[in-house]
Amino acid sequence: MPAARAIFSIFFLYSLFNRIKTYAKEQGYINDFSSGWMYLGYLITSLLVRLPDPYWLISLCSIIFLIPAFKALNYAQKQIETTIKQEKFNTPQIILIIIGSIMWLLILFSFVILFLYK
């Protein structure tokens, strides 16, 4: 399923950005973002994964182009009365954050080691 999600994101991400922007503006969101530039930036940085080691890590920056849409969507969702606001992380979420952080640190550490001892 991840492969299908990756392939279809190419076709549906631009329209999703537009739908989020329209929905957020209906809820009173005043900031604006360019769906086209965000889509293009996301697509280009995602394709940088084909670069050789360690330059493919630049592709991890593709999430930067999703931030404006997430901000708009979060604002719009906060305007709805039925939204449940989560004040803090629960225990399973904290455990997952710790495990994920350790994994990322190990990955970065391995890249540093490989780079230094090549």
Image (spheres, rainbow, N blue to C red):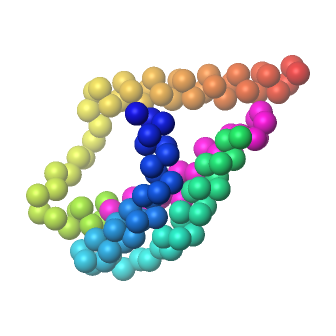
Residue 2: tell me if it is visible: yes
Q: Nearer the viewer, residue 100 or 16?
A: 16
Residue 14 in percent (x, y) is at 46, 64
Q: Nearer the viewer, residue 74 or 23?
A: 23
Residue 25 in the magenta stretch? The answer is no
- The quarter of the picture where residue 29 lies is bottom left
Q: Residue furthest right?
A: 118
Residue 65 in percent (x, y) is at 54, 59
Q: Residue at x 69, y 47 (%)?
A: 48
What span is colored magenta in the figure?
Answer: 51-73
Q: Residue at x 43, y 42 (%)?
A: 5
Position of residue 58 in the picture relative to residue 72 (left or right)? right
Q: Residue at x 25, y 77 (%)?
A: 26
- The quarter of the picture where residue 113 lies is top right
Does the magenta stretch mainly form a helix, a strand or a loop? helix
Residue 68 in the magenta stretch? The answer is yes
